[in-house]
Image (cartoon, rainbow, N blue to C red):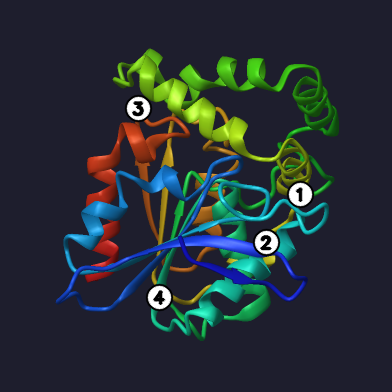
Amino acid sequence: MPHFTTTDGTRLAYEDYELGGGTGEAVVFAASWALNADMWEYQIPYLVERGYRCIALDRRGHGRSDRPSTGYDVDTTADDLGALLEHLDLTGVTLVGHSFGGAEVARYLARHGQRRVARVAFVSAALPLVTQTDDNPDGLPEAALEATIAQFRTDRPKWFARQAQVWYATHLGNEVSPALIDHTIGQCLSASPWATTQLFRSMFHADHRAGLAEITVPTLVVHGAADTSAPVALTGRRTAALVPGCRYVEYPTGGHGLHVTHAEQLNTDLLELLKG
C-alpha cells in the first residue's frame, strides 16, 4: 500500500486503483469518521470497472496511517487531503466525502480553492454546522458532545455496537448481515481512540457555511432521510440550500451507512455526476 509524508512528518496511507485503458479521470474518496479507505469497497470496483481511477485515503489515526498526537482538527485533515492531491499531482478530480470526510472536502475547497477539482459529492456529510449556536439554534447542544465523549471513554466498543443497527437503518428493512455489522464495528475500533475523540470534537464545532456558499463546481449532495448520525434536516437539506446549483438526492430509507445499504443507487448517482 503506498504512503506519502505530510508537512508535519505524518506518514499517510492511500489506495490507488485503475484498469488499463481507463480514462485516467480521478475520483478521490474521503472516509467517514472512524472508518478508513476500506469503507468504499462497494463504490471503488464499480467506478474502476467503468474506466475511472479511484484513490482512497486513510486519514491520520485511521487504517494504515500514522497515529500522531496532533492534527485532528478539520483544517489539518483537509490539508492532508490536499497533500495527497499534490503528491499525486491530480487535477480535474472528483472529491467524494462521507460524514466527516464531507467536512474535510468542504474545508479543503475553502482553504485551497477549486483549481484541482472538477466535481464534488457530499454523502451523508456532517455539514454545514452541527453544534448549537445563537445563529444555529436547531443544532446539537454542547452537552450532547460531552455525553458522547464520556461514553467513548467508558466503553467505546459498546457505543459502536449500539450504533451499528441504526447506522444502517435496518429497522426500515435495509438488509445488512450480522457479519457485515461486525466488520463495520471492527473498522471503527481499529482507529486510534485518541483520534476518534479529537475528530469528533472537531466535527461537532466546525462551521462550513461560508465555504459551501462559495462552491462553483458541479456538486451532488446525497443524504438519507433516516440518518440519525447526521440528521437530514440539520445537515443534508441545509447543505443543499447553501451550495449554489447543486443536485440534492434524498433516500427515504437511507441511514448514515447508505454507501452500503443503498450502494447501487449511490453508485448510479455518482456515475451520473461524473458523466455530467
Q: Which residue is mark 3?
A: 253
Q: Which residue is mark 1?
A: 202
Q: Which residue is mark 4?
A: 93
Q: Secondary structure at mark 1?
A: helix
Q: Position of residue 73 (x, y in %)?
A: 77, 56
Q: Secondary structure at mark 2?
A: helix
Please give the label number shown on residue 115: none
Q: CA distance from mark 2 to mark 3?
A: 31 Å
Q: CA distance from mark 1 to mark 4?
A: 26 Å
The amino acid on which the numbered mark 1 sits, given as a three-letter code, is: Ser
Q: CA distance from mark 1 to mark 2?
A: 10 Å
Closer to the eye: label 4 or 3: 4
Q: Is residue 12 left or right of residue 205?
A: left
Q: CA distance from mark 4 to mark 2?
A: 18 Å
Closer to the eye: label 1 or 2: 2
| Mark found first going from the N terminus, 4 or 3 | 4
Q: Position of residue 185 (x, y in %)?
A: 52, 26
Q: Residue at x 70, y 47 (%)?
A: 203
The amino acid on which the numbered mark 2 sits, given as a three-letter code, is: Thr
User: Looking at the picture, does residue 220 appear above or below residue 53?
Assistant: above
Q: Which residue is mark 2?
A: 77
Report the number of discs.
4
